Image (cartoon, helix red, strand yellow):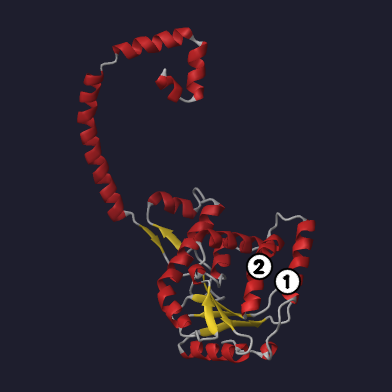
Amino acid sequence: MKAAQEMPETYIEPLKQSKKSARHLARSFRKFKPEQFSHRITGASRWMRSLTAAVMMIMAVLAPIHVLPTYAAPVDPEESVSPIVTVASAADLRQLRGDKKLARKEQSRLLALALRRKAALAEPEVTADMRTLERSSAKLQGLDYRLKSTDSLARKITSDADEDQVSLATAAAGISDVLRYTLTCSDADYSTMVPQAMAALTEKGYRVEKFRNAWGGKFYQGVNVHLMSPAGVRVELQFHTPQSFAVKQASHAVYEIRRNPASSAEEVEEATRLSIAYNAAVVVPEGARAIHWPVAA
């Protein structure tokens, strides 16, 4: 009875409906010789285990899986964007060739893994450089989240590809915040600290790809910078005051509602209203709107 209770319902129900089948099963079970069966299987299993081990060893040597970390590096617009994930096993090669295409979600995840892998290799050196920017009135925030998660990256790749109507590989190549940092500066020192920090990073070999001063904007208050590290990894750096950083964190939920395609029109409208109200309350530091930095050619 206990064994029957552990069986799936699809197997139990027919046994209840057919007494003849139940009697047949009982007779078969009585003829079953566990000791003979065990002896036969034991000999066979030794041979199978040896064969399986040999096959696995051959597969491990001849068919490793390689993830190439190329998409965190700058992409030449003249070049065609080729896949960044290569799989040496024949089955996966067939999938990538199109014999049996990988699901879109799986493609996004493989691209995300490759991006994160390259960023993770560069992270210790980049974090050390960012720590040199700290002062008594300037501190790094949220260092535990400096590496974007694989799941978050995969979602971003998919959403960016859908929004821009481009391939997943092209969307992955455009992501700039796999590795991201936030430096909060006091209101009094903000306008001098930002240029000093930018000068220190460019002297270390960082290239400025984008410099966006959003002070006075409706949905975001602060400076957002996209950098290319000396190792060829894209890095995002945000400059905030303690207040603007707190508002950014508090308004993240409404930001997600605004960008979610599943949100209703009413939800987006309310989230937009709240986001504008939050950011309107932020005090702009003196001289912050005039901060600028040249972008690399």
Residue 198, relative to residue 80: is it above or below?
below
Instruction: Look at mark 2 in the image and give the residue it sits on.
Output: 250
Q: Amino acid at mark 2?
A: Ala
Q: Residue at x 34, y 12 (%)?
A: 28
271 versus 27 height, above or below: below
Q: Position of residue 176 (x, y in %)?
A: 55, 73
Residue 196: which quarter of the image?
bottom right
Left or right side of 132 for 30: left
**Is the residue 138 above or below the residue 152 in the image?**
below
Which quadrant of the figure contains the N terminus? top left
Residue for badge 1: 278
Residue 294 can be seen, yes or no:
no
Q: CA distance from mark 2 to mark 1?
A: 8 Å
Q: Residues within 10 Å of mark 2 (few under 14, many from 20)?
A: few
- Disc 2 or 1, which lies upstream in sequence? 2
Q: Residue at x 33, y 14 (%)?
A: 29
Q: Residue at x 68, y 65 (%)?
A: 255
User: Three-letter amino acid code at disc 1?
Assistant: Tyr
Residue 50 on image: x %, y %: 22, 40
Q: Are the residues tagged 2 and 1 within 8 Å (C-beta)?
A: yes
Judged left or right of residue 126, residue 37 is left
